[in-house]
Amino acid sequence: MIKELAAHSDSVTSVLFNSEGFELISCGHDGNLRFWDLRKYKCVNDVAINMKKYDENILCLAQNKE
């Protein structure tokens, strides 16, 4: 382990790294999407995506490079 990033209040379900490897997006059952700067290990943006329903929330992240 290099660094622990503790910020979600519930289980993390998916992470997505950008192609350069300096940014990370995390999401989870708390309904938040968090954008991280891995050079500073800081959350740079936090977006509440949706409301929790039936104990499920964001399950997967994908990136389209067009």
Image (spheres, rainbow, N blue to C red):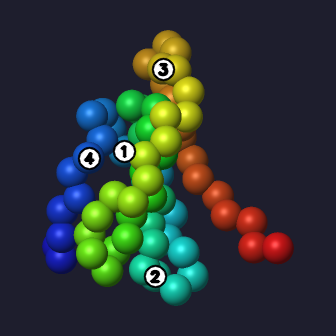
- The residue at which mark 4 appears reads as 7
Give the CA distance from mark 4 to mark 3.
17 Å
- The residue at which mark 1 appears reads as 12
Query: Which numbered disc, 2 or 1, marks the residue that appears first in the sequence?
Result: 1
Give the CA distance from mark 1 to mark 3.
14 Å
Dot 4: element? loop
Instruction: Tell me the crowding category of disc 4: few under 14, some 14 to 19, or many 20 or more residues within 10 angstroms, Cα based.
Output: few
Q: Nearer the viewer, residue 47 or 9?
A: 47
* Residue at 37%, 45% in the rendered image: 12
Query: Which numbered disc, 4 or 3, marks the residue that appears first in the sequence?
Result: 4
Query: Which numbered disc, 2 or 3, marks the residue that appears first in the sequence?
Result: 2
Give the CA distance from mark 4 to mark 2.
20 Å
Q: Position of residue 34 (x, y in %)?
A: 43, 51
Which residue is most to the top?
54
Q: Amino acid at mark 2?
A: Gly
Confirm or deny contact between disc 1 and disc 3 (CB under 8 A): no
Q: Position of residue 43 (x, y in %)?
A: 34, 58
